[in-house]
């Protein structure tokens, strides 16, 4: 699978998962919508389906639906935090352009 997590993203995902009662998968997807036509989706899920591709990175179980795999090739998931904002950021990959909101792509 082509998505990679930075050290900051790994640390934050592990922190969030540690607060959950059941084991969780980090589900990453690309869905239709947003101002750019497609948008990244990030969620925690407690199950998988036969349509999912599984990966393990730094003890984090990552799940991507087969349709999203091509869009996520080479994408780097980072976690950003400073005085004015905090959150996950998608960088790189096959994305040609992004919009101002930072969550949509073309």
Image (cartoon, rainbow, N blue to C red):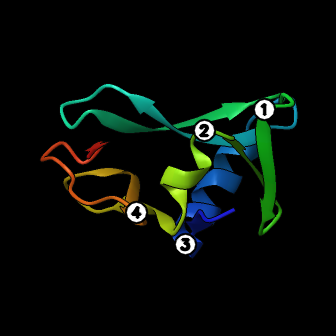
Instruction: Tell me where residue 25 sits by quadrant.
Output: top right
Pick whichever, 58 or 73, lies toward us.
Answer: 73
Question: Mark 2 and mark 1: span between their CA atoms?
Answer: 9 Å
Q: Choose mark 2 or mark 3, whichever is in front.
A: 2
Residue under the image location 58 percent in, 74 percent down? 7
Structural distance between the alpha carbons of marks 4 and 2? 14 Å
Please tell me the numbered disc located at residue 6: 3
Give whichever of discs 3 and 4 has the lower sequence position: 3
Lower position in the chain sequence, tag 4 or tag 2: 2
Circle 4 crowding by C-alpha within 10 Å: few under 14, some 14–19, many from 20: some
- Sequence-wise, the earlier of marks 2 and 3 is 3
From the image, tell me which residue sits under label 1: 51
> Which circle marks residue 98 in the picture?
none
Q: For the residue carrying disc 1, how many other residues have a C-alpha within 10 Å: few (<14), some (14-19), or many (20+)? A: few
Task: Measure how far apart labels 1 and 4 are at the Cα level.
Answer: 22 Å
Q: Do the residues labelled 1 and 3 touch (CB within 8 Å)?
A: no
Residue at point 81% right, 61% down? 56
Q: Which residue is drawn at 18% across and 42% down?
A: 101
Mark 4 sits on what residue?
Answer: 94
Return the residue at label 2: 67
Q: Nearer the viewer, residue 21 or 56?
A: 56
Percent position of residue 38, x then y: 33, 36
Earlier-in-chain disc, 1 versus 3: 3
């Amino acid at each position: 699978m082509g998505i990679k997590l930075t050290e900051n993203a790994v640390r934050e995902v592990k922190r969030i998962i540690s607060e959950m009662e059941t084991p969780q998968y980090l589900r990453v997807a690309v869905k239709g919508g947003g101002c750019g036509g497609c948008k990244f989706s990030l969620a925690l899920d407690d199950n998988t389906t036969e349509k999912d591709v599984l990966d393990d990175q730094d003890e984090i179980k990552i799940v991507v639906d087969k349709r999203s795999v091509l869009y996520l090739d080479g994408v780097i998931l980072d976690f950003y935090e400073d005085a004015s904002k905090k959150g996950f950021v998608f960088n790189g990959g096959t994305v040609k352009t992004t919009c101002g909101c930072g969550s949509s792509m073309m």
